[in-house]
Image (cartoon, rainbow, N blue to C red):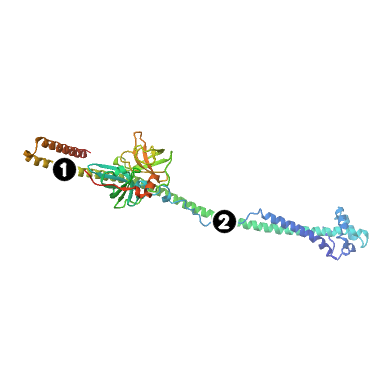
Amino acid sequence: MRTATPTGSWPAVAGVISVIAATVLAGCGILPSAPSPAPTNFVPTASASPGELAGGLSPDGFNAAQRMTVRVRNIGCGFLATGSGFALNEHTLVTNRHVVENAKHIEVSTYDGRVVQATAASTTTVADIAIVTTKEPLGTSYAERADEDPIEGDVITVVGYPNGGRLTTTSGVVLGETTDPLGGAVGPVLASTAQIEPGSSGSAVFNASGQVVGVVYAMNQSEQSFIVPISTLNNLLKEPALLVPNSEGCNS
Amino acid sequence: MSTDLPDAGSPDVASPHDAGVGEPEVGEAVVGDAGVGDAGVGDAGVGDAGEPEAALTPPKSRGRRGLVIALVFALVAVLGLGALSAYLWSVHSQYVAQNEELRETAQDLGDQVGTERAKIDEIQAHLDATNLQLGKAKDTINGLANSEAQAGDDRQALIDVADGLQECAKARQELINYLKQSYKWTTSSLRAIEASTTKYCNEVAKNFKEIVDD
């Protein structure tokens, strides 16, 4: 009859063990776990290469806008005129119609002093724009044209050769659309506060992203500059029929 | 306490009343009898089998059962605490080992960072100096390009002046030829040709002087 005692006590013992086991299991939740494996690589991920940053490394200290800007020399019949322009691609540049007007010969100087001979020039009556082609390459930096015109208040930068002198960068703000003060343009033009000089004609106008948003072509006595909007240039480049070859040579 | 434990061969254990130990009535009696472990146990130990007093025997087995439970509980607790301690010690050891490893790694990395920072400072100084030189070189390039452009303008202007002087010389030679055969021409026409030639040549000379003065 000794078995009578276990019969009564084991359930209780089992219950106690169950309670203890449950408590232990529950307690496992608050026990510290073993450490996770220690890291083996402590090298952080590189954020960006200096060359990838805005205004990154330059091969010669000049930025892309300066490298694509050219000085245009119009050798006319008994006169010499200078203006500015910018490279569209290896052999094509944009400037103003009045810069290449009545030219007997056109020469282009790059930012680093190379002289490139122009082979042909085309102009349009729609706007004060001329497209000049060259025999030798202009360089390695070309204009990235914006899709939309700048609006009032946008900050712009003009890079050119005022007075036919040194390569110069100036800034200003777009004042808004207006009609051509010279009366030659078909569409609206832009007025800005960027201060320019004779010789700046044909300079590219850049937005904050470095895209070309217009072409400088005139100024007034209030020191306002006037810009052919990029939409006009884009349309001209899409419609080559609007461009006619510029007549060269001296008639008189 | 050992005196309370009944022997395995004790007649009390073999009492027929044990059969009723598991019955509720007995259990209730046990629960209600606060003196189970005291005099009641002693009485039951000497009581005869089959007598009513034999009902007091369950407290004895209940005491043993409680002891067993306590022992089991203690054993489980000891085992549990042992396991817990072993686990905590193991975790502690792992953390200590990893901490040592990380501390050494941190020390190494700190040394490397210090070395690299020194290199960066040195490179930054070189970079600043190079940037300064690059800025000067850029100004020089810009200046030379401008000089080249101005020289090109001047060269072109001189070519124009040279062409003008050539035209001037040609016009004067024609004037001389006219004068040699002045009898063929009226005086007024000769004077008009001379005036236009002189005006043209003066203009060319003026342009040449402007270029030279610049």
Say whether mark 2 and mark 1 are on the same chain. yes
Q: Which mark is residue B98?
A: 2
Residue B81 falls in which quadrant of the image? Answer: bottom right
What residue is pinned by disc 1? B167
* Above or below, comparing residue A202 to residue B116 in the picture: above
Tell me residue B83's x, y (percent).
68, 59
Q: Specify the subunit that label 2 lies on.
A: B
Of A116 and B61, the residue lying toward us: A116
Tell me residue A19's x, y (percent).
74, 56
**Badge 1: how crowded within 10 Å, few (<14), some, or many (20+)?**
some
Say whether residue A73 is visible.
yes
Of B67 and A223, the residue lying toward us: A223
- Residue type (three-letter) at the residue carrying disc 2: Gln
Image quarter where the C terminus of chain A lies is top left
* Above or below, comparing residue B32 to residue A4 in the picture: above
Residue A71 falls in which quadrant of the image? Answer: top left
Q: Specify the subunit that label 1 lies on.
A: B
- Quote the CA–CA distance across marks 1 and 2: 97 Å
Q: Nearer the viewer, mark 1 or mark 2?
A: 1
| Side of B169 relative to B4 (left or right) | left
Image quarter where the N terminus of chain A lies is bottom right
Tell me residue A105's x, y (percent).
25, 47
Q: Which mark is residue B213?
A: none
Residue B78 falls in which quadrant of the image? Answer: bottom right
- Residue type (three-letter) at the residue carrying disc 1: Glu
Q: Secondary structure at mark 2?
A: helix
